[in-house]
């Protein structure tokens, strides 16, 4: 099947310290906590019109038609999982993605993954592409400097989300 290409906003989430928590809680309690996490993430994806593409263990990959929706969703996930005793890191990037048979690919997906990997515990990190697209919004961002993203040419300026409009 031929890949369909379009611009989308990519959100990656990942539970911070999941291996340590799984060892601490043991299998049954960890599975129950992970089910709570997954349920919370899926509720937020639905609320913010995100599309779940993949789940890998304790992380999610989702697509949005708008960076605003992706950022709001990431912030809601970050805040929501704190209530169940977890921290996540989130990465958001916007670019051309290829969709084939329910999966996505393209450099934008790789960049989103790399951005998420650089986020700290409880942090929503966005690429300069996303921040520039939201220049007129009421989101607050803090410059985290330029970073090399493994396997991606050049350096990328990243921003941490600091404020979400009401």
Image (cartoon, rainbow, N blue to C red):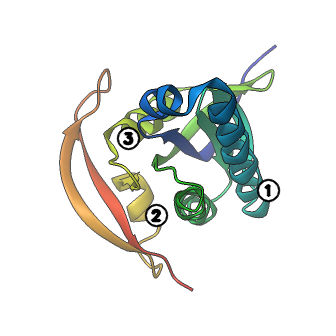
Which residue in the protein does label 2 denote? 133
Instruction: Identify the residue position indicated by label 3 in the image.
Output: 115
Give how far apart the Cα atoms at labels 1 and 3 are.
Answer: 23 Å
Q: Nearer the viewer, residue 126 or 21?
A: 21
Name the residue at 54% across, 64% down.
Answer: 79
**Label 2 with label 3: CB-CB less than 8 Å:** no
81 vs 60, nearest the viewer:
81
**Other-residue count near label 3 (Cα within 10 Å), few / some / many at <14 / 14–19 / ≥20:** many
Comes first in the chain, label 2 or label 1: 1
- Answer few, some or many: residues within 10 Å of disc 1's Cα (few below 14, many 20 plus, some between 14 and 19): few
Give the mark, 2 or 3, whose residue is nearer the N terminus.
3
Tag 1 secondary structure = helix
Camera-nearest label, 2 or 1: 1
The alpha-carbon separation of the residues under discs 2 and 1 comes to 23 Å
Q: Which residue is mark 1?
A: 46
Q: Is residue 134 above or below residue 125?
A: below
Which quadrant of the figure contains the N terminus? top right
Q: Disc 2 vs disc 3: which is toward the camera?
A: 3
User: Marks 2 and 3, how far apart in space?
Assistant: 16 Å
Name the residue located 42 percent from the left edge and 41 percent from the top edge.
116
| Left or right: 132 in relation to 84 | left
Could you tell me which quadrant the C terminus lies in? bottom right
Question: Residue lying furthest bottom in this view?
Answer: 166
Coordinates of residue 109 in the picture (x, y in percent) = 52, 32
Decide: is 146 above or below 79: above
| Percent coordinates x, y for residue 50 in the rendering | 72, 52
Note whether residue 91 is visible. yes
Q: Which of the two labelled residues, at mark 1 and mark 3, occupies the earlier sequence position?
A: 1
Q: Mark 2: few, some, or many residues within 10 Å (few <14, many ≥20)?
A: few
Left/right of residue 103 with respect to residue 150 in the rendered view: right
Q: Secondary structure at mark 2?
A: helix
Residue 38 % position (x, y)? 70, 42
């Amino acid at each position: 099947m031929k890949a369909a290409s379009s611009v989308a906003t990519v959100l990656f989430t990942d539970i911070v310290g999941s291996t340590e928590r799984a060892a601490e809680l043991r299998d049954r309690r960890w599975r129950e906590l992970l089910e709570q996490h997954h349920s919370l993430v899926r509720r937020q994806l639905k609320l913010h019109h995100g599309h779940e593409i993949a789940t890998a263990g304790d992380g999610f990959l989702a697509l949005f038609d708008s960076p605003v929706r992706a950022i709001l969703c990431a912030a809601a996930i970050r805040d929501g999982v704190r209530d169940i005793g977890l921290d996540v890191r989130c990465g958001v990037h916007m670019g051309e993605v290829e969709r084939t048979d329910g999966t996505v690919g393209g450099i934008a997906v790789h960049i989103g993954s790399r951005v998420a990997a650089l986020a700290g515990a409880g942090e929503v990190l966005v690429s300069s592409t996303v921040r520039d697209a939201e220049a007129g919004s009421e989101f607050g961002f803090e410059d985290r400097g330029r970073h090399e993203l493994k396997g991606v040419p050049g350096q990328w300026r990243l921003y941490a989300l600091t404020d979400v409009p009401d």
